[in-house]
Amino acid sequence: MAFSLSRTVLIISDEALCIYKVRSKDVQLVESVGWRIPEFAHTVAAILNRVAGDSGVIILNDAVEQHYRREKLPQISALDKSNIIKRRLNVAFPNYPTKGALEIKDKSRSAFKLTLTKPAPSAENQTVYLFAAVPASDNYRKTQQALLKSKASASAFVLLPVESADLVDELATRLIKENKQPQRAAWTILIGQHHGGGLRQIVVRDGYLALTRISPMALPEDVDPGQWAGDVAQDFQSTITYLSRFGYSPEDGLDVIMVGNPELSNLVGDLITTPCNFTALSLARAGELLRLNIGRNVDPHYADPLHVAWVAKKRTMSLKMTSPEFNEISNPRKAAFAGMLLLTAGFGYMGVTLADQVVALRGLQEDTKKLNVFAADVEKMYQDELKRKEEMGIDVNLIRASISIYGDIQKRSYDPIPVLEMISRELRVLRLDNLEIQVAGEAMVAPAADGTVPTLAGREAILSLKFSFPGTIRPEEGNEQIIDLASRLRTALPEYQISIPKNLMDLTFRGEFKDETGLTAVQRAPENRFTAEIRIQRTFANEGNPGT
């Protein structure tokens, strides 16, 4: 995918949908649309039609609920890789429809690992994957509906922490070169406050995402700056506590980069007690180091425009998330692009091969003449052999007709086993008292004088399922069970006709009353049983049916 000079990026946060326009000269926050506003889908669709038109947009998930898991898989072939990863993803996240996997390649300075012990020798033949999944939230559904109402389509659905892991790695590398530090730390943490108030922390080790957290955080203008800095430092300390579970040690080294207002960032740096290399960067300076044009159309306190510019610059995403819902909003764009490629390739192929087809046609004409001569010779040899067999008393036509009849009988045989298995599954709590199977049809007639076999008549299979119920059951309950079973069988056996010749009791009103004295229906003895019947019927075509 070639990088466009203008791209539209949607950030799904917990508070709002932020719509960004990324151009070669700047990043612009077009609109921040709250999830609870009336007519959300129409509002966002109108903005997308104005900003993106019919081009593709990137959906960047920055919400709290993101789930990650590392899995080790054995070395697998390229043909089986996709299916095996898909199965493992379904096992790891069975309840999340949107998921993806990223292969973690060893490009580390300290051999990538997040454990306290060294990997076993057998691990050399294993590949580490980062599995990610997000739930089907209402916010994502609203975004999907807005895209469906607009002319735009989704080109990618990605997670902000995963896509920005290489941003953190690149930013730390450039700071090392700028500050002329002798050695790069093993761990790097990027801190920044995003629109909606969330404080996003992205922890990277050796170029890959190791941990990410987003915490609710008040805006600096709403509280005392010292209090705000203290809250950020306390949240950072919680991240360090989490990191200890993943093998973090102060001896590994830690680089901390905070993007935002440098004055506020330095207040946070003064309160951090963990040994680290702390760097405070303004949004513009961070963009300059990464060769990104942020511009002046965004609030310099927020760091999410930096992530938007970075993702928009990418030619390919690190981890594209897939789901049936995303396919619904991305398939139109893919279909149009594929159609354009196919059309271009088709014209090129036709132009290149036209001359070859003319030459090939002439060759086929010559080959056809030769084949016709060969076929005539073979037919003459067959007739001569047939005449010789008849002189020996062998009726070849009779043998051929017999073989044809046998094959037709085999094809017309009815196998009830698949139907019975389906009935057994659908019975559930019902108990079958009697089962009758009838297969009716006309008998076959003898071959004609010329040896041809006439068409077999149609056949009909009838399966009668008979049930009995105790006399204590309410007839309407028994009737409902029989009707439910018939409905399930119609769904499971669409090629069969399902009918109910006999219910437990006909409960329709017929214009007459019948008085009952003595025992009531509730007091009826169990041995006085109700009976019911379901009939399964099918007429087969002349070509026969195996019974399914």
Image (tube, rainbow, N blue to C red):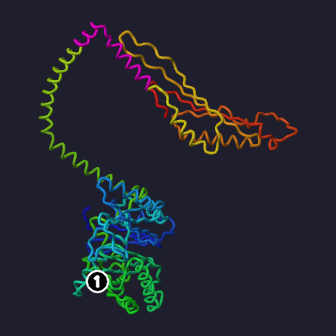
Q: Which residue is mark 1?
A: 285
**Can residue 85 be found in the magenta stretch?**
no
Give the vertical position of 459 relative to 146 (above or below).
above
Instruction: Residue at the far front: name it.
Output: 121
Q: Which quarter of the figure has residue 87?
A: bottom left
Task: Tell me the magenta residue range.
Answer: 383-410
| Rendered location of residue 263, percent (x, y) | 36, 91
Position of residue 197 measured from the top left corner of the image (x, y, whole percent): 45, 79
Q: Position of residue 67 (x, y in %)?
A: 44, 68
- From the viewer's perspective, is 164 left or right of 459? left
Q: Is residue 418 above or below residue 132?
A: above
Res 83 visible: yes
Residue 391, magenta (yes or no): yes
Residue nearer the viewer, 285 or 429: 429
Name the quadrant containing residue 25. Answer: bottom left
Q: Nearer the viewer, residue 453 or 257?
A: 453
Where residue 237 sits in the image (x, y, percent)? 43, 85
Position of the N terminus by quadrant: bottom left
Residue 10 drawn above or below residue 437:
below
Please tell me whether mark 1 sits on a helix, a strand or a loop.
helix
Of the residues shown, which amino acid type is indicated by label 1?
Arg
